[in-house]
Image (tube, rainbow, N blue to C red):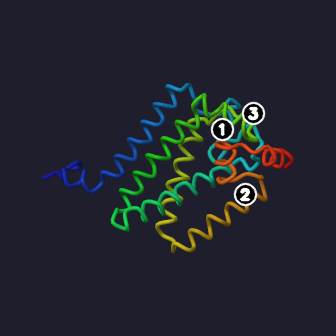
Amino acid sequence: MTPQLSSPNSFRKHWPLYATAGVFLLMIIILVLLGRRPFSESGRFLLWIGDHNSAETSQQCFDPYSITHALHGMILYGFFVLVSRRKWSLPLIFFITLCIEAAWEVAENSPFVINRYRNATMALGYTGDTMLNSVCDMISCALGCLLAWRLKWWLSIALAIGSEILLALIIRDNLTLNVIMLLFPIDAIKQWQLGG
């Protein structure tokens, strides 16, 4: 007798995997509809871009801002653990976290947010992410969520704070500054960031 590959029990057990794949697919479809490019116009494929001012930032797989997407995953994991009073399963938290991250990736690549970044932040030449970068941002978020699940809560907080400090020192930007500058731009911060 041949084993069934997709029994009802198998689906119930693996629904987060299927649902997460569906979220990735839906995000990609929406990014296509928004006119996002799949890959960098340069034709190059790079795993890492270390220069946050490079034209390849947000165009290739990973860049310094990938760390902020990992922080999204860590923060959302911690938030949902607190909100659910530790009653939600990891697969459920993981799925909801990636739904939120996918929604952010779509919003971040909308004309409104792209223009907001150009006008209010140090990302003067920002043109949005490639689909490759958006998928890798989702992977960074997923890894951040899983990392927070594995680490003690205090170690997750220390890692998040350390990452924010390190990013501020190295690229003069981080998740906190990104949110501040996107929502409530402060000229002094923008001038400091542009001076780096």
Position of residue 62 measured from the top left corner of the image (x, y, whole percent): 64, 48
Residue sticking out furthest to the left: 1
Crowdedness near tag 2: few (<14), some (14–19) or many (≥20) residues, C-alpha within 10 Å = some
Cα distance in 3D space between marks 2 and 1: 19 Å
Crowdedness near tag 3: few (<14), some (14–19) or many (≥20) residues, C-alpha within 10 Å = some
Amino acid, disc 1: Gln
Query: What mark, if any, has residue 128 been given in the picture?
Result: none
Q: Give the mark toward the camera: 2 or 1.
A: 2
Amino acid, disc 3: Gly
SS at mark 2 in the image = helix
Position of residue 121 measured from the top left corner of the image (x, y, whole percent): 73, 40
In primary-sequence order, the first of circles 2 and 3 is 3
Amino acid, disc 2: Leu
Q: In this view, does 137 lie above or below 73?
A: above
Query: What mark, if any, has residue 125 been given in the picture?
Result: 3
Report which residue position mark 1 lands on. 59
Q: Tell me where residue 128 sits by quadrant.
A: top right
Report which residue position mark 2 lands on. 167
Q: Give the mark toward the camera: 3 or 1.
A: 3
Q: Residue at 34%, 52% (x, y): give it.
A: 16
Q: Tell me where residue 54 sits by quadrant.
A: top right
In primary-sequence order, the first of circles 2 and 1 is 1
Residue 64 or residue 108, whichever sits in front? 108
